[in-house]
Image (cartoon, coloured by chain):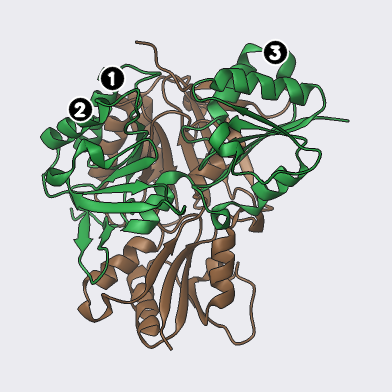
Chain colours: A brown, B green
Amino acid sequence: MRGWLAIAGLGPGADALMTPEVAQALEAASDVVGYAPYVARVPERAGQARHASDNRVELDRAREALRMAAEGRRVVVVSSGDPGVFGMAAAVFEALEAEPAWRDLDIHVLPGVTAMLAAAARAGAPLGHDFCAINLSDNLKPWALIEKRLRLAAEADFAMALYNPRSKARPEGFARALAVLGEACEPERPIIFARAVSTSEEQIDIVRLRDAAPEMADMRTVVIVGSSRSRIIKRAGRPFVYTPRSVPA
Amino acid sequence: MRGWLAIAGLGPGADALMTPEVAQALEAASDVVGYAPYVARVPERAGQARHASDNRVELDRAREALRMAAEGRRVVVVSSGDPGVFGMAAAVFEALEAEPAWRDLDIHVLPGVTAMLAAAARAGAPLGHDFCAINLSDNLKPWALIEKRLRLAAEADFAMALYNPRSKARPEGFARALAVLGEACEPERPIIFARAVSTSEEQIDIVRLRDAAPEMADMRTVVIVGSSRSRIIKRAGRPFVYTPRSVPA
């Protein structure tokens, strides 16, 4: 039997945000591979093997998945959100490039709703004009590059989606990022802290940049910083934030 | 009866890429509102009214939808992809901000798989590291701002997803964008032209920037430009493109 590998995005949390394409791949799989909390989101099925691993072992996990597909198994590697946005897809292709024997395997990436889209939807439309997405973890790149990108993004007047703002291993980085943004952006700019969107632990906080504090983010938070033109619409409940489509000449 | 408004993303084309949340909202709706080709993607239902309109009338469409929700109707405004990324969500909030009487309506944004995620999945993982999304249409912003953003994005070494690269009304803009990229980026950089992803008319072309031509894009294409570190993996079929997760110090 011919094996295959699908690298699938589970969406941000709720089953209602997972695509039918991903649900079908999970039904057909012989093996589900991923970071333990993401594998735990997949319902157990008789005859389906589960391979849950720790954080920070993405390349080992990618090689294991490719090896099983090469042996004829039907393998789904799961990521939260979209696998192509700071998820497992890039790790699988890095492992693939290093091993020519795996090159012609049947490999597909199945997209999903990435965290920033779910977070933006809860807040309104903060990404309604040009924007960028930056991973704030400096595990795999120098911190100086992160600061450079934040400054250039502010100069371009992009809205910004900031992934992995803070973790136990990196408690200080997000405070430094907020300091850079405080220098480069107006203090009234809206900033959205969206935690665990679409799960029972969802929490959305919308403040002005001047009132943002590092403790408002943790490892399950995605942060969206508006552009200079983003607007807050006050109403009875939580306000809406949107970035207008137009910029006057 | 209390009305509501949902601004929903249909995904890039295939039903298998539309979330269950959006499918449920469409089942519950009394009225479906949108640009005609997107309304045409929604199956007709007895008792459900359809309000299809032309391109470039987003604000009129948004007001019509808000007015109907205020009258107690259950309204879904549909966008292709994700409504918060160059879709209808920002237009609805712009209309909402202008009319205090609508401010406390029941309004939700339902996220979807935006075109760049589906395009990236087909190509591999070109958005696997930091990236930006730029709308190349100059209908609502000056062309000089688009050029400035392209240059700053190249300086930040973002991968770039370029929406609305070319239309009949704007045949020249994408040629100018390619010229800017040609000055700011290495000629070997991979560039992906992804047209009508997940539909029967899907076409994916992967070339080097030096070989990119304006005619490779039309109004149904999203273009992804790799970063300086993006890699092409050659194989028997279409190659994969990915952007490595790491940048050495």
Identify residue for label 2. Answer: B176
Q: Is residue A177 above or below residue A190?
A: below
Classed neighbour count for the residue bearing mark 1: other residues with Cα under 10 Å, few (<14), some (14–19), many (≥20): some
User: Does B241 sit left or right of A40 as displayed?
Assistant: left
Determine the residue positioned at 59% across, 70% down: A40
The quadrant holding residue B175 is top left
The N terminus of chain B: image quadrant: top right
Between marks 3 and 1, how big is the CA–CA gap? 33 Å
Q: Looking at this view, name the residue that lies furthest to the right.
A: B1
Q: Amino acid at mark 1?
A: Trp
Confirm or deny contact between disc 1 and disc 2 (CB under 8 A): yes
Q: Which residue is mark 1?
A: B143
| Residue B24 in the image, given as x and y percentages of width and height | 72, 49
Amino acid type, mark 3: Pro
* Element carrying mark 3: helix
Task: Judge depth for marks 3 and 2 and give the one in front.
Answer: 2
Q: Is residue B87 visible?
A: yes
Disc 1 or 2, which lies upstream in sequence? 1
Between discs 3 and 1, the one toward the N terminus: 3
Of residues A166 and A3, the one nearer the viewer is A3
Instruction: Give above or below for B33 relative to A135.
Output: above
Which mark, by number, is residue B100?
Answer: 3
Depicted A185 relative to depicted A153: above or below:
above
Give the chain letter at badge 3: B
Nearest to viewer (mark 1 / mark 2)? 2
Residue A73 quadrant: bottom left
Real-space Cα separation, disc 1 to disc 2, in angstroms:
10 Å
User: In this orientation, does residue A217 appear?
Assistant: no
Q: Nearer the viewer, residue A67 or A189?
A: A67
